[in-house]
Image (spheres, helix red, strand yellow):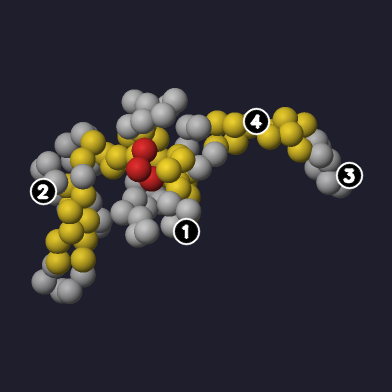
């Protein structure tokens, strides 16, 4: 599965318990088709102290969510959009917004 969403993109969650919220993608895991979004899908993990310096306790962190639950937000029109591809004159392939036809990749 090839991910069209990349690290640093702004996305909208379209389904699940975080539906309607937006955030920045921190990490994409292409092998499982999941992405971690900043301050969304928070889970609590209980950790043991591993050394004298690290403390144990309850750590709250982001859990990955499936890419099908995310939709790209266009920087120009600020609306959720599907992505298209356009080939430039210099041979590069860039992602484009299907709503406003604006180039997403710089």
Lower sequence index among marks 1 and 4: 1
Lower sequence index among marks 3 and 4: 4
Task: Say what secondary structure mark 4 lies in.
Answer: strand
The quarter in which the C terminus is drawn is bottom left
Q: CA distance from mark 1 to mark 4?
A: 24 Å
Q: Residue at x 68, y 34 (%)?
A: 45
Q: CA distance from mark 2 to mark 1?
A: 29 Å
User: Mark 3 or mark 2, which is nearer to you?
Assistant: 2
Q: CA distance from mark 3 to mark 2?
A: 55 Å
Q: Indicate the position of residue 91 as horizontal and vertical percent values.
A: 17, 74
Question: Would you say the residues marked 1 and 4 are in contact, meaning their CB atoms lie under 8 Å apart?
Answer: no
- Identify the residue under disc 2: 101
Q: Is residue 38 visible?
A: yes
Q: CA distance from mark 1 to mark 3?
A: 35 Å
Quarter of the image for residue 16 reads: top left
- Identify the residue under disc 1: 31
Closer to us: 50 or 17: 17
Label 2 CA crowd tier, 10 Å (few <14, some 14–19, many 20+): some
- Identify the residue under disc 4: 44
- Identify the residue under disc 3: 52
User: Mark 3 or mark 4, which is nearer to you?
Assistant: 4
Q: CA distance from mark 4 to mark 2?
A: 40 Å
Name above or below for residue 12 compared with residue 9. above
């Amino acid at each position: 599965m090839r991910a069209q969403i990349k690290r640093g993109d702004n996305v909208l969650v379209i389904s699940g318990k975080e539906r309607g919220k937006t955030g920045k993608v921190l990490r994409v895991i292409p092998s499982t088709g999941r992405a971690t979004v900043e301050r969304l899908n928070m889970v609590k993990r209980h950790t043991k102290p591993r050394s004298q310096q690290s403390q144990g306790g309850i750590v709250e962190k982001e859990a990955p969510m499936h890419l099908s639950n995310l939709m790209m937000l266009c920087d120009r029109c600020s609306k959720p959009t599907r992505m298209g591809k356009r080939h430039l004159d210099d041979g590069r392939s860039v992602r484009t917004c299907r709503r406003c036809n604006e180039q997403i990749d710089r």
